[in-house]
Amino acid sequence: MVRCGVLVLVLVLSLVACAGKLEPQERASRLSDRLGEFRALIRWGHFDVAAGFQLSQTAADPAVLADHAAVTTLPQGEDGSEVMDPATQEPIRIAFFNTVNQTLNENKDGAHVVSIIGYYRVDDPTVRQLRYRHSWWYHYELKKWFLDSALPEF
């Protein structure tokens, strides 16, 4: 009978230990999902919606967090792939957005990401590349990743 009790105790402790290890993996998985949504928004020129992913970790107050608690959905239908280059006010199109490096911190609640974004001006078919370095942080209460960097500038 004592052996059975010890076995149950060992099983319970093992399950608790596994549950604790699952949380960081879940955060990492949520980051991958969030990065995929963000890439799609930038790729198709939906910078206005992508801006909703931005939230500075140092400036996050409860009122701002309440606005970000709503689920951001990807726009349907309209092709917004043509955007204006803020520097030249010329229309550009995004050709591709690839993540080349993604580094999570030890707690898996912060990440540094390096991406390459290919773009071209509508009147010039030369594809240019932009190296975009962006930082992300995880909000434990909202269970959501937020961009703590500026949107890419072309």
Image (spheres, grey):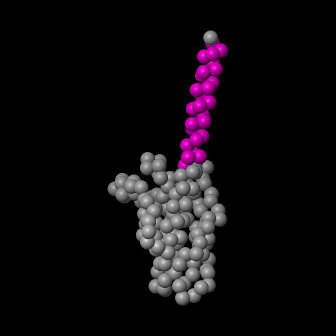
Residue in view at x 53 percent, y 85 percent: 122
Q: Is residue 15 magenta?
A: yes
Foreground residue among 106 and 2: 2
Give the answer, above or below, for where 140 lies relative to 152: above
Q: Residue at x 44, y 68 (%)?
A: 77
The outermost residue toward the left is 63
In magenta, the rendered stretch is: 2-27
Q: Is residue 64 left or right of residue 53?
A: left
Could you tell me residue 90's position as x and y percent? 48, 85
Judge whether 49 appears above or below 69 on screen.
below
Quick check: 25 above or below 118?
A: above
Q: Is residue 103 or residue 74 the one in the foreground? A: 74
Foreground residue among 135 and 52:
52
Q: Position of residue 113 (x, y in %)?
A: 59, 62
Which residue is farthest bottom?
123
Residue 142 at what x, y percent from top left? Answer: 43, 50
Picture quadrant of residue 73: bottom left
